[in-house]
Amino acid sequence: MHRVPPAVSLLRVSKSYGRASTEQHVLVNVDLTIKRGEFIVVLGRSGSGKSTLLNLLGAMDRPTSGHIQIDGTDISGLEEGKRTKFRRTALGFIFQAYNLIPTLSVLENVQLPLALNGIFDDAPALQLLEDLALAHKANAWAEDLSGGEQQRVAIARALVHSPSLILADEPTGNLDIETGREIIHLIDDLARRSGQTLIMATHSQEVIGYADRVLTIRDRKLVEV
Ligand SMILES: Nc1ncnc2c1ncn2[C@@H]1O[C@H](COP(=O)(O)OP(=O)(O)OP(=O)(O)O)[C@@H](O)[C@H]1O
Ligand SMILES: [Mg+2]
């Protein structure tokens, strides 16, 4: 029988910034296993290391020591070109500040991850815009949209290439409570429909209701709440 690797596995992961006398240990010997399709919420006070953790999981930064496996691939060991390819195919990112490209249309923003993978097909982007009730904005400039609309575009962009792991760093941080609730509901719904694993850093207690597991970073460790 084949053993399916966990969606995410962290083995004694540490992350420090700076060196020598100014060295700051943010995460120390963190172990974590996440099953496929789980929705994990990461809490923790400002500066505790939530974004640091997501940057490591997103292969945007490397751990100081330890190993990170995603779907059985050790991303800490990949050389730069392979890491970039891995990010583009296996991961989807949603940020607090949306990070859309203002000079591209909504549709072009959503298509971008597929285009970077050499796929020039409108259909997945149009379908997601439809799912997110944004089809009528497909040809608008991204910068002309409201914050909640921009975050919905960012969700479509994060999902268009069907990543197995979605990383969301305070996706409702810039939104009012009602819009934030709607955004969490949409992310949760789309991820669950596709069996995607979702890891979300947040300050919002409301998100907890959607999560399968809630973790918090305390004293440089990740602990279950
Ligand atoms: N690139 C970096 N260089 C040096 N120090 C960094 C870097 N990134 C983060 N840090 C430090 O690591 C600590 C954790 O930062 P991080 O951004 O992960 O916190 P956070 O939990 O996401 O906080 P917030 O809730 O405010 O977003 C902070 O003390 C921060 O100053
Ligand atoms: Mg942060």
Image: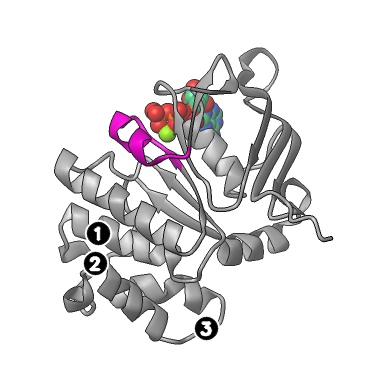
Q: Position of residue 158 (x, y in %)?
A: 43, 61
Residue most extreme to the right: 1
SS at circle 3: loop
Q: Would you say residue 105 is visible in this rendering?
A: no
User: Does residue 90 appear to the left or right of 99 in the view shown?
Assistant: right
- The residue pinned by badge 3 equals 119
Do residues under tags 2 and 3 come within 8 Å of each other at their CB atoms? no
Quadrant in which the N terminus is drawn? bottom right
Q: Would you say residue 101 is visible in this rendering?
A: yes
Alpha-carbon neighbours of circle 2 within 10 Å: few (<14), some, or many (≥20)?
many
**Which residues make up the magenta segment?**
200-212
- The residue pinned by badge 2 equals 142
* Label at residue 150: 1
Do residues under tags 3 and 1 come within 8 Å of each other at their CB atoms? no
Amino acid marked by disc 1: Gln
SS at circle 2: helix
**Quarter-wise, where is residue 124 in the image?**
bottom left
Residue at image coords 44%, 70%: 160
Q: CA distance from mark 3 to mark 1?
A: 23 Å
Amino acid marked by disc 2: Ala
Q: Position of residue 51 (x, y in %)?
A: 48, 36
Question: Foreground residue, 153 or 78?
Answer: 153
**Quarter-wise, where is residue 223 in the image?**
top right
Looking at the image, residue 186 lies above or below residue 204:
below
Foreground: disc 2 or disc 3 = 3
Question: Foreground residue, 3 or 113?
Answer: 3
User: Does residue 111 appear to the left or right of 205 in the view shown?
Assistant: right
Amino acid marked by disc 3: Ile
